Structure formats: C-alpha cells, structure tokens
Amino acid sequence: MKIDVLTLFPSMFDGILNESIIARAIKDEKVSINIINFRDYSNDPHKKVDDYSYGGGAGMVLMPEPIFNAVDSLKRDDSLVILMTPQGSKYNQSIAHTLTTKKHIIIICGHYEGFDERIRTLADIEISIGDFVLTGGEIPAMAIIDSTVRLIDGVINSESHEKDSFEEGLLDYPVYTHPASFRGMDVPEVLLSGHHENIRKWRYNEQVKRTKERRPDLLESDL
C-alpha cells in the first residue's frame, strides 16, 4: 500500500512515521507513506495557498489550484482520494478495513477556515473522525493511517486485532496481567482456570455486557 498525505505541516507526522508499529511497517515495506507539502504545488511566486472568502467571512480559505495540482501529479488509476473534513462520513473500523484493500490512498488535510468548495470534487470519500472541529486535518489523517496500517497483513499478528473493539460490533473484553491481586482488586477466577472454553464464553459475555453499558448504539445498529 502507498499513502500520500497532502498537508501544509509535514513535520507534524514525524512522530507517527518514526515510532512503533508504523515505523516497523515502513521498514518492512508493508506500506510506503509520503508526506507532501502542497505549498510546493502553488504557482504563485510567493507560494500562496490561501485567500479571503468571496462574500466575506472570518479566516482564510485554501485555494483550489495547489491541491488540484498536487492530486493531478500523484493520482493513478487505482488511487482513492480522501478529504478530511468535519462534514464527512464518520470514520469507523469497517472503513479502516476497506482502506486496507486499496493500493494507493491520497489524503488531503484541510487547514485554516476551510477549503474552496471545488476541492470536494477531487475526493472519492470525505471522512470525519468525530463530531468536533480541529485546527486541521493532520491529526485525523494520522488516525486513519494508524488504524489502517495496523490491519495490513503481516504488520501485526492477526489475533491482536481480530478481537479488537468494533471488530464484531462489540467493545473489547477486559484484560488483566500480574499480579493476580492488586490493592484489593482480583483477576476473575475464570481467567486463572486454564479452561479455554469457559474463558472464551466469559470474554464474549463481558463484551456484550460492556457494549450494553457503554455503547448500546452499537447493538442497536445491528437490529
């Protein structure tokens, strides 16, 4: 998989690309991630990328030309273009799985007060990571990269994500480690029993219980 990210702040991605699972996936050539400053695609002598909005209003708006130029340069027949925007479809684990099937993803990060409406025509899908507004699309883009790359075959052990929250429409079950008793809180006896079938049943029941308590909407969506 190849991921190209269009942003005005490339250094924001230094941490995610050079640490932990993402860095290992890049090293193992499971994914190629390129962070591209779309200011480089501006034809303005001063590399201007934003301007005032027609009709007035607060803040500066991203101009279409630099982003169109960048996408034109990068896009292939098999590319999927994602526009990060609070107005997009809410991101979830199902979308993350779908993205792993794509060979090339281009992520456009907005910034400032917004972007020229014509930029939307470039996108195959618009994505939001929640009902809140950030200063730009960089942090949401990182969330998409992280959640997608970890699902690519061979990046992590498949067992590590098959029982993740949301994989089966349920939240994850509680987990424990040593010591068996800590400050009056004990590990459930079934986990110490060595009886794999009883442990499996307990974990599933805990998933259902936790989902009912914390995210009943996940259960309702399956009705």
Image (spheres, rainbow, N blue to C red):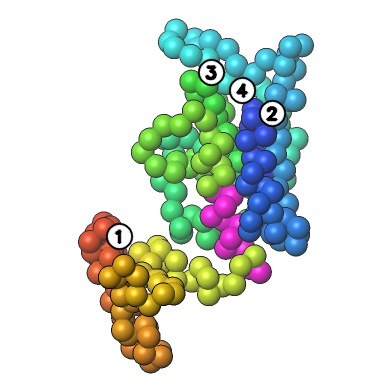
Mark 4 and mark 2 residues within 8 Å of each other at the beta carbon: no
Question: In which image quadrant can residue 73 be found?
Answer: top right
What residue does disc 2 label? 38
Q: Quadrant of the N terminus?
A: bottom right
Q: Which residue type does callout 2 highlight?
A: Phe
Decide if residue 65 is on the left or right side of residue 147.
Answer: right
Q: Nearer the viewer, mark 3 or mark 4?
A: 3
Decide if residue 24 is on the left or right side of residue 55.
Answer: right
Q: Earlier in the sequence, mark 2 or mark 1?
A: 2
What residue does disc 4 label? 64
SS type, badge 4: helix
**Position of residue 170 measured from the top left corner of the image (x, y, whole percent):** 34, 66
Q: Earlier in the sequence, mark 1 or mark 3?
A: 3
Mark 1 and mark 4 residues within 8 Å of each other at the beta carbon: no
Q: Earlier in the sequence, mark 1 or mark 4?
A: 4
Q: Which residue type does callout 1 highlight?
A: Leu
Q: Earlier in the sequence, mark 4 or mark 2?
A: 2
SS type, badge 3: strand
What residue does disc 1 label? 218
SS type, badge 1: helix
Question: In which image quadrant can residue 51 be found?
Answer: top right
